[in-house]
Image: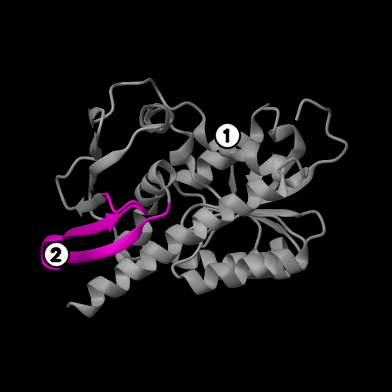
Amino acid sequence: MNTEPERKFGVVVVGVGRAGSVRMRDLRNPHPSSAFLNLIGFVSRRELGSIDGVQQISLEDALSSQQVEVAYICSESSSHEDYIRQFLNAGKHVLVEYPMTLSLAAAQELWELAEQKGKVLHEEHVELLMEEFAFLKKEVVGKDLLKGSLLFTAGPLEEERFGFPAFSGISRLTWLVSLFGELSLVSATLEERKEDQYMKMTVCLETEKKSPLSWIEEKGPGLKRNRYLSFHFKSGSLENVPNVGVNKNIFLKDQNIFVQKLLGQFSEKELAAEKKRILHCLGLAEEIQKYCCSRK
């Protein structure tokens, strides 16, 4: 991306919550990847008119406009599948916040559609661009895992909008898969107290070498957003991540990756490996959901 852009891709941002607002900020600021992109407008269900000089446009106009070549899907997870399908069918490239869909079959179908249309379909994974993940990746290289656990706590989240906890928490699953390779499901339980807005999902996984990994998502009022991890190796243990610095511009780093894909700077091998990992994680999330629901 060191070259001067020969052309700019017109972008529309769909959904202007936290992620959408950050995306719009990055698109308007002078960054190397933003030089290849031109923010045309945003789409929202709310009547907002304009935000910082950027005009709101209708979904219909975004889909039909020749100027719009790229859609950033930053809406609630439950709406991702429909938006991706509409924009791909309209001949647009798509960047979508994770999870791209709430089922494996839908993700496979949309990837096939993107390939048929010759368009980039990119699922954001900013958790892989965090300083903590870079630290962990270095720490686990070449080590034999004996067992491990990852607990994530946070405030309540509406399942209707963000999907089953295995989908809304897929970034934690992506960490585990990226660190230890493909995983298989052993068992899963879901404890819920809807009147208290409380839930706890406990998942038992194992690596290809049969090492056990537990993943717990616990959400409810008063629970602070925190990640607790414990990995035991033959050569020692790792208990939580030290303070390894501030995560700067992780959405911008993700945009850089997306622009590289638009410019054809990713190899087929890299794209295939990423797609395989994303589909593996979505497949696991769906398996966990089915396992929990069958035991209700």
Tag 1: amino acid: Leu
Mark 1: secondary structure: helix
Disc 1 crowd, CA 10 A, few/some/many (<14, 14-19, 20+): many
Q: What's the image's color scheme?
A: one colour
Residue 168, by quadrant, is bottom left
Residue 79 vs 36, above or below: the answer is below
Label 2 Cα crowd, 10 Å radius (few <14 / some 14-19 / many 20+):
few
Task: Say if 134 sits above or below 81 in the image.
Answer: above
Classify residue 103 by image quadrant.
Answer: bottom left
Image quadrant in which the N terminus is located: top right
* Residue 43 % position (x, y): 60, 57
The stretch of residues the image draws in magenta is: 182-211
Residue 65 visible to the viewer: yes
| Residue at figure coordinates x 76%, y 37% from the top left | 36
Residue type marked 2: Glu
Q: Secondary structure at mark 2?
A: strand
Whether residue 148 appears in magenta in the rendering, the answer is: no
CA separation, marks 2 and 1? 37 Å
Q: Main secondary structure of the magenta part?
A: strand
What residue sits 17% from the left and 60% below the top?
197
Marker disc for residue 191: 2
Assign the C terminus to one quadrant of the image: bottom left
Is 162 above or below relative to 248?
A: below
Q: From the top left corner, tell me how far across and down residue 32 is, in percent.
A: 70, 28
Left or right: residue 247 versus residue 51 is left
Q: Position of residue 162 (x, y in %)?
A: 37, 61
Residue 78: which numbered mark, if any? none
Pick the front one: 8 or 258 = 258
- Whether residue 196 sits left or right of residue 232 in the image: it is left
What residue is rendered at 11% in x and 61% in y?
196
CB under 8 Å between discs 2 and 1: no
